[in-house]
Image: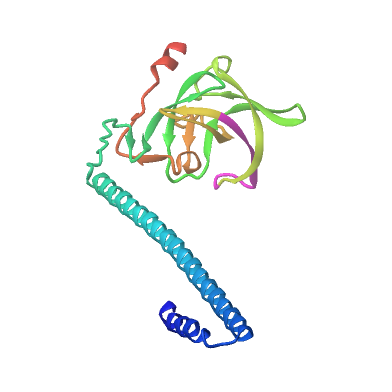
Amino acid sequence: MLRRFVPLLTFAVLSGCSLTQPQQEQTMQAINVMEDRVNFQLATMIKQIDDQNVYIANLEREISTLSQDMSQRYTDSTLLAFDEEEEEKAPVPVIIDNDPRIAHGKVILGEEEWVWLDTTQSFYKARIDTGATTSSVSATNIQIFERDGKEWARFNLNHTSNENPNEADIVEAPVVRWVKIRQASANGVNRRPVVEAWVKLGQLHEKAQFTLADRTQMAYPVLLGREFFKDIALVDVGKKFVQGMNEQQVQQN
């Protein structure tokens, strides 16, 4: 830009010697105007160059920050993948269950088991019947009464028909419902109460429902049906008394 105007300025100065005073003043004014324009253009160009330098510096800083961030992410992902690979390679512990009373997280029941009733604090021999849906307990002298506005049943839990009624365990339990039983040896339908009682069998301690029935002619005063042990126990009819008796309960008894 300066190279263009320097010859003009030189020519103007040399030619000014032959100009009159008014013409010289006009020439000097034109020269001053041109000089101001040149200075303004130079200042503008310098300002643009400075702004571009600042912009380039900012871009370089952003690129450097992004590069560091990407490098850190790559390092973290590499370490994470390494950790996951190490976890996959870690040996899985094999849990061996040596308790013969448990299999696959479920209690094993034999064809016959000892059951503990919390109400009487006693053990009773029970038949585990996979063909029966509901459970039942031997009951004689059944009496239905009301307690706190609800039906309750009081009965003697007899082990055998030869047992002295005075020695039979007396049980009181709330009645949860009634069932109709049709017997082939008798005409009509019998209504029997169903009560709830807490039962412990090995590691199982559950509230179960029992139909009250006279089982004194049967070998087992308690029968456990599928509703009691479904989803929580496995039945092995080739075994008996797998769960045994809890020693602490035996001492209490």
Instruction: Pinpoint residue 33: horizontal percent, then vertical percent.
Output: 58, 78
Q: Is residue 166 left or right of residue 11?
A: right
Instruction: Relative to 19, say whether 123 is above or below.
Output: above
Instruction: Relative to 5, say whether 226 is above or below.
Output: above
- Seen from the viewer's position, the closer of residues 243 and 14 is 14
- Seen from the viewer's position, the closer of residues 56 and 231 is 56
Residue pictured at 28% horizontal, 47% vertical: 79
Q: Is residue 164 left or right of residue 66?
A: right
Instruction: Relative to 121, say whether 234 is above or below.
Output: below
**Colour mode of the rendering:** rainbow
Most extreme residue toward the right is 149
Instruction: Pinpoint residue 119: horizontal percent, then vertical percent.
Output: 57, 22
Instruction: Indicate the quadrant where residue 165 lies.
Output: top right
Please check the rendered image and state whether residue 44 is part of the magenta-colored stretch, yes or no.
no
Residue pictured at 25% horizontal, 35% vertical: 96
Instruction: Indicate the quadrant where residue 249 lies.
Output: top left
Instruction: Pinpoint residue 122: horizontal percent, then vertical percent.
Output: 49, 19
- Magenta residues? 184-197
**Quadrant of the snapshot with the N terminus:** bottom left
- Seen from the viewer's position, the closer of residues 99 and 210 is 99
Residue pictured at 39% horizontal, 54% vertical: 65
Instruction: Pinpoint residue 127: horizontal percent, then vertical percent.
Output: 42, 34
Predominant SS of the magenta segment: strand
Instruction: Indicate the quadrant where residue 93 lies.
Output: top left
Residue pictured at 60% horizontal, 79% vertical: 29
Label count reads 0
